[in-house]
Image (cartoon, helix red, strand yellow):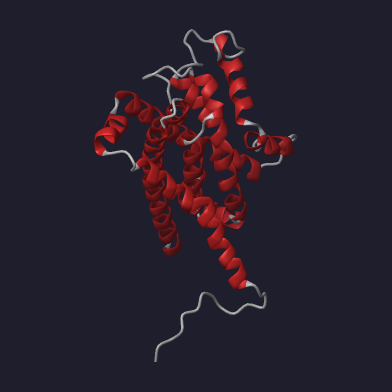
């Protein structure tokens, strides 16, 4: 006898069909339809017009810079963000609440304001830039600094709640059994944090790849040197080349999706592995 398919278990709270329908409608209007429209606009170009856009030296350099700087910034944020989350969770010190609130500043600060502030600080005559013999602003290093700035909160706020749930008694038991502090961190605590760290990396990376406002000022926007992919899209749009802009955006979206899919697979594997352990 065939069983009737059911979406969920019975609940005392009514309204499942209404809320489920609203969810599908919202995702369709806000996410799915715009993405489909983007690919349709990009595929309006024939291959002879699409290939020079996708394989041009300017495009390849911008893609290498955007994805490379975003990955390096996300990796750096994983290291520093995990340490900051550890300090905020495990220690009590004067000014802790102020430091904790400061972490969220990149969330609230307009990206253009962040870009102008970073440029003023790291320019050759800025407070920090003037201390070095090499240029920081208007170079890939300046782009990396801007991406680190906007991506750090994602790692901290993802790792911090998980770290708060780690029972201190587990660490004390590890120490009682003779494990060193380093062994306790890497063999007891870190396996629990790996899924959260991967999530923070994915969020920081995704934000960095599409970042425009905080990067555009400090980048310098020199072709084949400090141009990022979002800037190429804006340049195409300003030249009334909407199909070319859609093609660049589609390539960028596809590459980002594949990278994030790989990260999610690694995250799922890590969760299964830690669950089995």
Front residue of 267/26: it is: 26
Q: Nearer the viewer, residue 242 or 103?
A: 242
In the picture shown, does residue 16 fall above or below 275? below
From what the image shows, is residue 163 above or below residue 124?
below
Find residue 159 and report its horizontal and vertical position in percent.
Answer: 56, 47
Position of 64 compared to 157: left or right?
left
Q: Would you say residue 195 is visible in this rendering?
A: no
Residue located at (30% from left, 24% from top): 57
Q: Foreground: 125 or 207?
A: 207
Q: Quadrant of residue 81?
A: top right
* Quadrant into which the C terminus falls: bottom left
Q: Position of residue 3 (x, y in %)?
A: 43, 86
Q: Is residue 13 left or right of residue 47?
A: right
Q: Which quadrant of the structure image shows residue 140?
A: top left
What residue occupies the far bottom of the structure in this picture?
A: 1
State left or right for residue 121 relative to residue 33: right
Is residue 107 visible in the rendered structure shown here? yes
């Amino acid at each position: 006898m065939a069983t009737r398919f059911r979406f969920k278990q019975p609940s005392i709270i009514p309204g499942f069909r209404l809320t489920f329908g609203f969810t599908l409608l919202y995702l369709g209007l806000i996410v799915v339809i715009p993405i489909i429209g983007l690919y349709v606009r990009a595929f309006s170009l024939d291959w002879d017009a699409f290939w020079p856009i996708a394989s041009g030296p300017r495009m390849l350099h911008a893609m290498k810079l955007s994805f490379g700087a975003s990955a390096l910034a996300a990796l750096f944020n994983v290291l520093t963000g995990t340490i900051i989350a550890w300090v905020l969770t495990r220690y009590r010190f004067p000014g802790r609440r102020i430091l904790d609130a400061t972490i969220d500043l990149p969330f609230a600060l307009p990206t253009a304001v962040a870009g102008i502030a970073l440029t003023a600080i790291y320019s050759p005559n800025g407070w920090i830039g003037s201390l070095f013999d090499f240029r920081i602003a208007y170079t890939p290093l300046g782009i990396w600094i801007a991406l680190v700035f906007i991506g750090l909160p994602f790692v901290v706020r993802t790792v911090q709640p998980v770290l708060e749930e780690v029972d201190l008694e587990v660490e004390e038991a590890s120490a009682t059994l003779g494990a060193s502090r380093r062994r306790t961190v890497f063999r007891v605590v870190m396996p629990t944090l790996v899924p959260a760290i991967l999530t923070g990396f994915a969020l920081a990376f995704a934000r960095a790849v599409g970042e425009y406002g905080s990067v555009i000022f400090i980048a310098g926007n020199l072709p084949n040197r400090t141009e990022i992919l979002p800037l190429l899209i804006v340049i195409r749009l300003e030249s009334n080349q909407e199909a070319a802009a859609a093609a660049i955006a589609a390539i960028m979206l596809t590459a980002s999706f594949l990278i994030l899919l790989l990260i999610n697979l690694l995250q799922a594997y890590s969760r299964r592995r830690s669950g089995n352990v």
